[in-house]
DNA sequence: AGGCCGCTGTCATGTTCCTGTCATGTTGGC
DNA sequence: GCCAACATGACAGGAACATGACAGCGGCCT
């Protein structure tokens, strides 16, 4: 059916997955480290990757990046022991088609492999960010919320994208200053508030951006 | 959660990282030079190190070596302004578990810290506090009880969290004044009662917070 | 060059929200 | 019933945030 690469540092997990996938009719390639995986990517034609994020040495994200760097990007299903939303979102943002939490159900994983193999996946993954009813067109820097659609400036875009990626979590003001403004100190002004204000006025007051007095801002799926 | 040591010669970066890590629940130790770091390594029990490679005087690699020389080696995440592959590989060779390029995303760094520290602890426990039918979203300062959901102010949150953590026990008024208000004396007013009142009115009169006349308040599982 | 325009940080001002205090009402124990 | 302890509603000072205006800057066109 297809060639699947399994990347995991644990020998047991590797063989378990290899056998299961083989019994489903897939050819299987395995790698125990991120660098081995990246290397093997060059030589073999792989249709799908099952990737453990947490590995000693170079992490799984490096593999994700390597995959993205290639022209014909291969779908990646990420296995993650880390459950927090941030990591999941980050993995998805970096091009993973799916994130499965460890411990995982084998049948479920196989189903996900089946779904993503062959089916030419929608390229929507890296073009759009969909969170909390907001759709952000990454290439065009354009956001749509309900009936409102607006084009964002670089700063606004960067801020909104950050909040969306960290959906469900609170972003402290210093965090935003560091990641969006690339400042390691508080400029003593209210840039963040102003930029949030600009977002709210462009997309409507009812976008799910919550203010947490004394802490920062957060974007939430539920109202 | 864990003790993290931050080693960087730039004051600003140090404090930024210290605050961010602290807000994630870690204890933080900082060092401005490699030698200070190595020294502090002897006296403190550190679970993870965030290390800047480029520092005046003894470089970061010296710290890496010192860590490796110890029996129980501590995971090290290297911050590097140098982008070339050689340095990255050398750092990894010398035992770093991860290398992050400067300028770095705070979010990403925090995720990596979590990942490398997380192995020891059960995850997701710190996101919610579930006691007596009340669910408290710690990051968001939002409480849900039955069908009622309300966002809490800093004081209310702090008070409720304290009661929930000490569930089943009576919290004397002075204890609350000390731990929630950080007062070592009785202000002679009824702050506590007022704040309890605000909690009750936000979450409904039937939340399991009991008044113990002459003593204080307690939160109980059974109604 | 000169002028226009959009982006962005800053500031002054308005607004909201938090929080301790007090006055008053209510409750519970004796 | 009395008193102490607690509950409740209102209020004011202040902090944190929201908002509108403005100016510097750089790109772009003429």
Image (spheres, coloured by chain):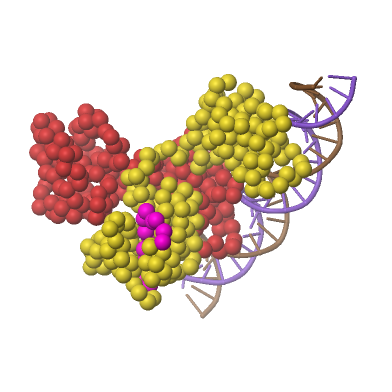
Chain colours: A red, B yellow, C brown, D purple
Residue B3 position within the rendered picture, expressed as x and y whole percent measured from the top left: 42, 53
Quarter of image, res A102:
top left
Region in magenta: B43-55
Residue B13 position within the rendered picture, expressed as x and y whole percent measured from the top left: 46, 64
Q: Is residue A69 above or below residue C23?
A: below
Q: Which residue is pictured at 51% across the width and 29% down the height?
A: B131
Q: Is residue B105 visible?
A: no
Horizontally, is A63 left or right of A221 in the view?
Answer: left
Q: Which residue is pictured at 71% across the width and 35% down the height?
A: B193
Q: Is residue B16 visible?
A: yes
Nearer to us in this view, D20 or A195 = A195
Residue A170 position within the rendered picture, expressed as x and y whole percent measured from the top left: 49, 45
Q: Which residue is pictured at 57% across the width and 42% down the height?
A: A205
Is B53 covered by the magenta stretch?
yes
Quarter of image, res B62:
bottom left
* Badge count: 0
Nearer to us in this view, B16 or A193 = B16
Nearer to us in this view, A157 or A211 = A211
Is A216 covered by the magenta stretch?
no
Q: Is residue A137 above or below residue B217?
A: below
Q: Is residue B20 above or below residue A88?
A: below
Residue A87 position within the rendered picture, expressed as x and y whole percent measured from the top left: 36, 45
Horizontally, is A91 left or right of A66 in the view?
Answer: right
């Amino acid at each position: 059916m297809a060639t699947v690469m399994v990347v995991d540092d644990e020998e047991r997990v590797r063989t378990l997955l290899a056998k299961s996938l083989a019994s489903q009719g897939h050819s299987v390639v395995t790698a125990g480290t991120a660098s081995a995986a990246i290397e093997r990517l060059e030589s073999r034609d792989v249709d799908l990757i099952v990737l453990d994020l947490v590995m000693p040495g170079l992490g799984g994200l490096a593999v994700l990046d390597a995959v993205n760097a290639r022209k014909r990007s291969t779908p990646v299903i990420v296995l993650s022991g880390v459950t927090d939303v941030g990591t999941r979102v980050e993995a998805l943002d970096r091009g993973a088609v799916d994130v499965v939490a460890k411990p995982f159900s084998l049948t479920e994983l196989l189903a996900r492999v089946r779904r993503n193999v062959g089916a030419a996946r929608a390229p929507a993954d890296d073009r759009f960010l969909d969170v909390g009813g907001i759709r952000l067109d990454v290439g065009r820097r354009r956001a749509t919320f309900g009936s409102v659609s607006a084009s964002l400036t670089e700063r606004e875009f960067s801020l909104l994208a950050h909040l969306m990626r960290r959906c469900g979590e609170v972003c402290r003001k210093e965090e935003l200053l560091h990641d969006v403004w690339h400042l390691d100190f508080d400029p003593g002004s209210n840039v963040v508030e102003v930029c949030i204000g600009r977002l709210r006025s462009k997309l409507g007051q009812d976008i799910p951006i919550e203010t947490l007095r004394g802490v920062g801002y957060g974007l939430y799926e539920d109202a």
